[in-house]
Image (cartoon, rainbow, N blue to C red):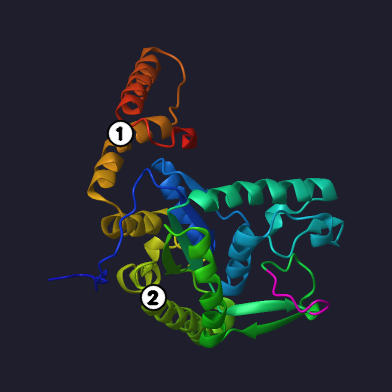
Amino acid sequence: MKLITEVSLSPCPFRMDLRSPVLLTGSCFTQNIGSMLERYLFPVCINPFGVTYNPLSVKKGLEALVNREAYSEKDLDQYNDLWFSFDHYTGFSSPVREKALKGINGSFLEAKEFMHRARYLVITWGTAWIYRYKPTGEIVCNCHKIPASRFIRSRLTTEQILQEYRLILPLIFEHNPDLKIILTVSPVRHWKDGAHGNQLSKSILLLAIDELVSLFPEELYYFPSYEIVMDELRDYRFYERDMLHTNALATRYIWEKFIDVMLSGESRKIIQDLEPLLNLIEHRPLKTEGEAFRKMIINRDRKLREMKERYPFLAWQNLK
């Protein structure tokens, strides 16, 4: 007897490889999957604009990576003594304008170069709700704690999303013809809209993705992270204390599903080989002296040398 309703994963028309650069952008779920890819030494670039929730802000970032050369001081705003960009999340903000701009352009230029050679792009949408800044009418990535009265909040329609992505996707593929895109919807529920409001928002995202995949069946693939959490991980042991955000156990579960359908057999074998070494590197012993600790360090360094010799193409610089 099955004790869960298992989500069926459709075949993917392409397979990711540990040699292939992966660019990830979107909600905090993108951060979770990106961190797992980084742990297993994929060449990755994760959320160069910071966490981005709505499809049009994600689209704006992708468009900038293709068309923009850099950000300038005129792209910054100031509120409560902090300089920031409405295209970026709060982690780039600074009381020093030059520092904010330096951080923004450092991340942007790295991602722009990465975009040229990326083989996979993972996009995660979190919500269909957007905020427009009243003075300019622009859709913002983050409100930067500016009073809500200065924004107009509205919910995107499926057609609005499709209209924008029908324009940006051909531009992206012209920029990088070898790129493949994995679309996901964040399983994190936006509870301030209520249970029904959250479902409406997620449904709009899912309908838009379904249409885009049908338009670009060879280049796009939908990975059902939202459905896996809603249907397979119903137990609250898979959630953080707020009972909304998924925890490390859920991320690991989704990761196992992800690699099963997305990764080549060779890459899954390499990940299996890496696991003992990564566990040794991540181990934090209670005592950092004595014979046991010395042997552990010798064993770890030996395994590291062996793995570097066996897989020299891995992104070893990702090791923390």
Which of the two residues, 126 or 176, is positioned nearer the viewer here? 176
- Residue 272 image point, x, y percent: 26, 41
Q: Over which residues does the magenta segment extend?
A: 134-140
Who's the residue at 87% across and 56% down the image? 81
Tell me if mark 2 has few (under 14), some (14-19) or many (20+) residues whose alpha carbon lies within 10 angstroms of its own.
some
First in sequence, mark 2 or 1: give its number: 2
Closer to the observer: label 2 or label 1?
2
Left or right: residue 19 versus residue 161 is left
Q: Name the chief secondary structure element in magenta.
A: loop
Q: Is residue 145 above or below residue 210?
A: above
Which of the two residues, 272 or 110, is positioned nearer the viewer here? 110
The span from disc 2 to disc 1 (Cα, nearest Å) is 38 Å
Mark 2 — residue?
A: 213
Q: Is residue 43 magenta?
A: no
Residue 223 appears in the figure = yes
Who's the residue at 35% across and 73% down the image? 217
Disc 2 residue type?
A: Val
Q: What is the secondary structure assignment of the residue under circle 1?
A: helix
Tell me if mark 1 has few (under 14), some (14-19) or many (20+) residues whose alpha carbon lies within 10 angstroms of its own.
few
- Residue 295 image point, x, y percent: 34, 16
| Image-quadrant location for residue 141 | bottom right
Who's the residue at 50% across and 73% down the image? 189
Mark 1 — residue?
A: 276
Disc 1 residue type?
A: Pro
